[in-house]
Amino acid sequence: MQLYILPGNPPPNYELRDVYNRGYEHYKKTWERLFNRPNRPKLYDPMGYYRQNYIFHVEDDERVVCQTLGTHYHLDNKISLDLPFFEKFYGAPLEYLNKNHVSSCLSLEYSSVAKAYSPRKLDGLNMYKVIIQLSIKYAKSLAVDAVIGHPRRLTKTNDVTTEIGCKVIKANEEKYGVTVDVSVGLLKEVTSYSELNVNRLINNLWDSRIDSIGLTTEDQEQYYSQFLETNKIKAEVA
């Protein structure tokens, strides 16, 4: 398996566009089915993928295994609390963030695991735990104060996050037509999972990660060069 960290809106000459497109196909297939249910308002929105700062994405020989998406928010930016993401954070969740002096947050959103890689198919190995912990490792590398999100109750993603120290501040909320909890994980309190097989895979994936944005590697200059070298792909093909 391979962990990729992708941008939601890649540069013009992005070198991992095939991976990015496979990631979007997985996102669309997963969330269009959940958000556009028969006889209900159609709530699927491709902007949920496109607007993200980070797409945490695991593949197994070009087959999507699991995915979660993240965006950095700073509460000192006046726009932050006006954004749709924060609608469910008004009241107790925001009070909790302020009480704990949280200003810099990384959202964890749209967590999903392909059916072929469910715990039943992998002898109990929970890929939700793998992708959540990998995202938290990335959050720690960004030195944010907390991870925040709306984990779904049906898939028990809320249990996956509380197991390592994230706190449910509001429970049984509705967002996008599904039932969620409003959750905050202070990075100074979040721990690791106890399962050996989960942690072994997390460490292997992290050590071999391909961070195409370059924030946790030495390749950030290469990422930004893809904005500037407008004829790069044509030149290579020629």
Image (cartoon, rainbow, N blue to C red):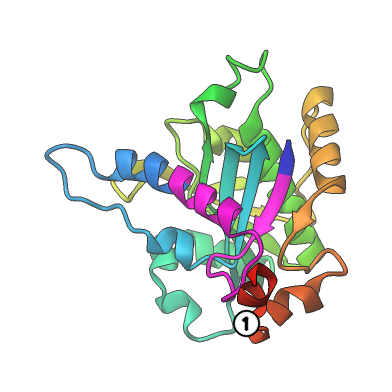
Left or right of 113? Residue 34 is left
Q: Please tell me which residue lies in front, 80 or 211.
A: 211
Which residue: 45% across, 40% down? 152
Q: In the rendered image, is residue 144 in sight?
A: yes
**Quadrant of the image containing the C terminus:** bottom right
Q: In the rendered image, is residue 91 in sight?
A: no
| Residue 201 x %, y % | 80, 32
State whether residue 92 is above or below residue 200. Answer: below
| Residue 37 x %, y % | 22, 39
State whether residue 151 is above or below residue 81. Answer: above
Left or right of 80? Residue 58 is right
Q: Please tell me which residue lies in front, 115 or 164.
A: 115
Q: How many marks?
A: 1
At label 1, counting other C-alpha atoms closer than 10 Å, the crowd grade (few under 14, some 14-19, many 20 or more) is few
Secondary structure of the residue carrying numbered label 1: loop
Q: Please tell me which residue lies in front, 22 or 6.
A: 22
Q: Please tell me which residue lies in front, 44 or 170.
A: 44
| Residue 209 x %, y % | 79, 50
Which residue: 77% across, 33% down? 193
What residue does disc 1 label? 231
Q: Which residues are magenta?
A: 3-26
Which residue: 41% across, 74% down? 83
| Residue 194 x %, y % | 80, 28
The residue type indicated by label 1 comes to: Asn
